[in-house]
Image: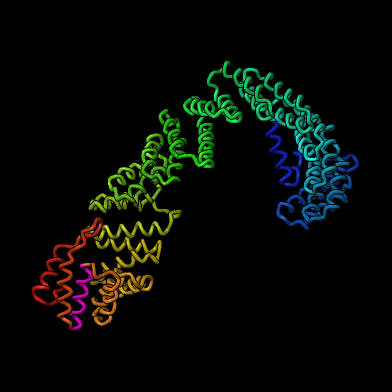
């Protein structure tokens, strides 16, 4: 089909209206028009001051621009360019009356200047002075008969003022200039309906179809117009003619489905839907629209979801050109909380579009929730290639390896992940990455690297209390930088005063600094807040009580710690064998063993 210029012109007209001003015509030679009554010297001065005024205007020095324009007017009172620019300055100052007067004078001096008149029309339109706007555009349409913009504006204005017959006349002129098109014919059809001239309305669409007899889209439009305006028999006949000529033509099939639905033939409507949805030539967009309508109907009529599921399953048996239909299906299943049923659909999406991030993340959330670590690894590993910038995939992949005691693989993933951190990265996520990396380094016995990672974590988030707790605890275990450890640990206790782990860390730092009485206060709180089920915390209780002279109670805590045993839950850091042997030695010797 030949492309119409009307839409482009409409966009231009709207741009002019939005700006509230028209552009200046391009010129060669002098800045303002030359007039015979000016000497060469006067013309030179006029050009100089005019250009200087424009320069001041660009610098937003409007008072200087205004003064220079007034000076130009003294040199040549009948300069259209000067009068036009003055009107623009008046508009900027909100002096509407002077702006209109100056603009009209500019038009008097340059009656053939299209853009001056366009500016006046736009000015009236912004002021909502419709009759004046119409008058200017009518004048422009006569003076510039080949220009589309005035005619398009008149069409809109005549329609707004219910002058439908005049709107049709203008549309006819546009058609003469730009040729018959869908947009123009549909607009004329609408005007004829508003004029209650239904016969001419249908004739207009029929003529469009005849203009392009081999373009079935226009014939389908004709059928749709019949259908939507009380002529179902004509619509049916038109659709059948199309399908006889082009069997399987998707738009006509869709229109036939609409015909069956509106005429109440539900069985044929359903059959037609199946025909469309299983037609590989029908565009995905059309199928999505039908499926959305079917879902909406099912929801409004409280139909069983199995009907929707059966329809989707039937569609997805066909090869899919993209993942749009299975994405819609997965969204429907998730909205119905049918997570298990959505998983194979999400897997199908990844087979079609391996780089589909939402589907991959949804599958990973199911795997994480079910603690299916192998599935997390299977899903996250290729994601690093498809989405190398997405930190969440490194995070969950690294954690999955870590929880499977695959420390080396976890370390490699987090090392690779932190290389993706940049100035645009979420600072909290970046902080967590470095925090976990620090934990991994420490587990590998790489203390210097661990502390460097913790420092980086606190650069991104100085209030990351999980980082501060681990950092402080490992410093205390190594008995180094205890003041720094105490400062960080105290912040964690202030932030979460009932966190048994943080309380234990702070108590242990105080113990290492020889402040045993204070340490006992915090270890008691740690034990009351869940620490009594941790072998490490209970053992710390025994060590602290031993140093405040309560040796029997210390022994009781050590025995209890030994009975609890080390934490063997998935993802827990195993205690070194030396620490377990030392606990048993404390019990056997009934005294603290450093």
124 versus 216 height, above or below: below
Q: Is 534 in front, or is 420?
A: 534
Q: Residue furthest right?
A: 37
What predominant SS class does the magenta segment belong to?
Answer: helix
Residue at horizontal 75 percent and vertical 35 percent from the top = 152
Place residue 459 in its image quadrant: bottom left
x, y (%) of residue 95? 82, 55
Residue at horizontal 40 percent and vertical 39 percent from the top = 355
Name the image quarter holding the C terminus.
Answer: bottom left
In the image, residue 216 lies in the stretch drawn in magenta: no
In the image, residue 543 lies in the stretch drawn in magenta: yes
x, y (%) of residue 197? 78, 28
Residue at horizontal 39 percent and vertical 46 percent from the top = 361
In the shown orientation, is residue 5 left or right of residue 290? right
Q: Is 87 in front, or is 260?
A: 260
Place residue 566 in its image quadrant: bottom left
Magenta-highlighted residues:
535-549
Q: Is residue 327 visible?
A: no
In the shown orientation, is residue 26 left or right of residue 430? right
Place residue 10 in its image quadrant: top right
19 versus 575 height, above or below: above
**Colour basis:** rainbow
């Amino acid at each position: 089909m030949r492309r119409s210029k009307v839409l482009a012109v409409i966009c231009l007209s709207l741009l002019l209206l939005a700006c509230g001003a028209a552009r200046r015509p391009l010129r060669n030679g002098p800045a303002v028009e030359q007039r015979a009554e000016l000497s060469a010297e006067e013309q030179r001065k006029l050009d100089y001051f005019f250009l200087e005024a424009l320069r001041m205007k660009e610098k937003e020095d409007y008072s200087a621009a205004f003064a220079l324009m007034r000076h130009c007017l003294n040199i040549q009172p009948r300069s259209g360019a000067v009068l036009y620019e003055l009107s623009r300055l008046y508009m900027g100052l909100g002096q509407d009356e002077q702006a209109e007067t100056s603009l009209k004078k500019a038009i008097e001096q340059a009656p053939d200047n299209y853009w001056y008149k366009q500016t006046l029309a736009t000015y009236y339109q912004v002021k909502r002075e419709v009759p004046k706007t119409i008058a200017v555009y009518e004048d422009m349409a006569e003076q510039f008969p080949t220009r589309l913009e005035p005619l398009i504006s008149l069409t809109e204005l005549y329609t707004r003022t219910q002058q439908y017959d005049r709107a049709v006349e203008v549309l006819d002129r546009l058609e003469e200039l730009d040729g018959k098109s869908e947009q123009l014919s549909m607009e004329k059809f609408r005007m004829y309906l508003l004029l209650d001239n239904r016969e001419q309305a249908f004739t207009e669409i029929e003529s469009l179809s005849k203009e392009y007899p081999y373009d079935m889209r226009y014939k389908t439009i004709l059928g749709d117009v019949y259908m939507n305006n009380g002529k179902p028999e004509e619509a049916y006949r038109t659709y059948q003619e199309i399908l006889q000529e082009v069997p399987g033509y998707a738009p006509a099939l869709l229109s036939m489905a609409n015909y069956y639905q509106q005429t109440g033939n539900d069985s044929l409507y359903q059959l037609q839907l199946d025909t469309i949805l299983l037609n590989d030539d029908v565009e995905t967009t059309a199928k999505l629209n039908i499926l959305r309508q079917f879902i909406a109907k099912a929801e409004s009529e409280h139909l069983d979801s199995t009907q929707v599921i059966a329809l989707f399953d039937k569609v997805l048996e066909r090869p899919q050109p993209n993942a749009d239909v299975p994405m819609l299906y997965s969204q429907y299943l998730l909205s119905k909380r049918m997570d298990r049923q959505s998983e194979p659909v999400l897997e199908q999406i990844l087979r079609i579009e391996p780089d589909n991030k939402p589907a991959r993340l949804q599958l990973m959330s199911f795997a994480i929730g079910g603690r299916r670590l192998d599935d997390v690894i299977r899903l996250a590993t290729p994601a690093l290639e498809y989405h190398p910038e997405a930190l969440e995939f490194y995070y969950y992949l690294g954690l999955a390896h870590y929880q499977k005691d695959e420390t080396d693989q976890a370390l490699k993933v987090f090392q690779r992940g932190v290389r993706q951190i940049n100035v645009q990265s979420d600072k909290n996520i970046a902080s967590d990455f470095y925090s976990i990396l620090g934990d991994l380094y420490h587990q590998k016995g790489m203390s210097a690297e661990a502390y460097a990672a913790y420092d980086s974590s606190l650069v991104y988030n100085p209030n990351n209390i999980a980082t501060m707790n681990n950092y402080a605890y490992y410093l205390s275990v190594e008995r180094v930088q205890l003041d720094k450890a105490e400062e960080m640990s105290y912040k964690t206790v202030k932030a979460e005063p009932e966190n048994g782990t943080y309380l234990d860390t702070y108590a242990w730092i105080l113990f290492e600094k020889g402040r045993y009485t204070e340490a006992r206060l915090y270890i008691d709180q740690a034990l009351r807040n869940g620490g009594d089920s941790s072998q490490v915390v209970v053992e710390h209780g025994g060590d602290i009580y031993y140093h405040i002279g309560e040796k029997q109670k210390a022994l009781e805590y050590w025995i209890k710690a030994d009975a609890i045993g080390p934490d063997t839950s998935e993802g827990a850091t195993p205690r070194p064998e030396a620490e377990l042997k030392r606990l048993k030695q404390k019990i056997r010797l009934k005294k603290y063993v450093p």
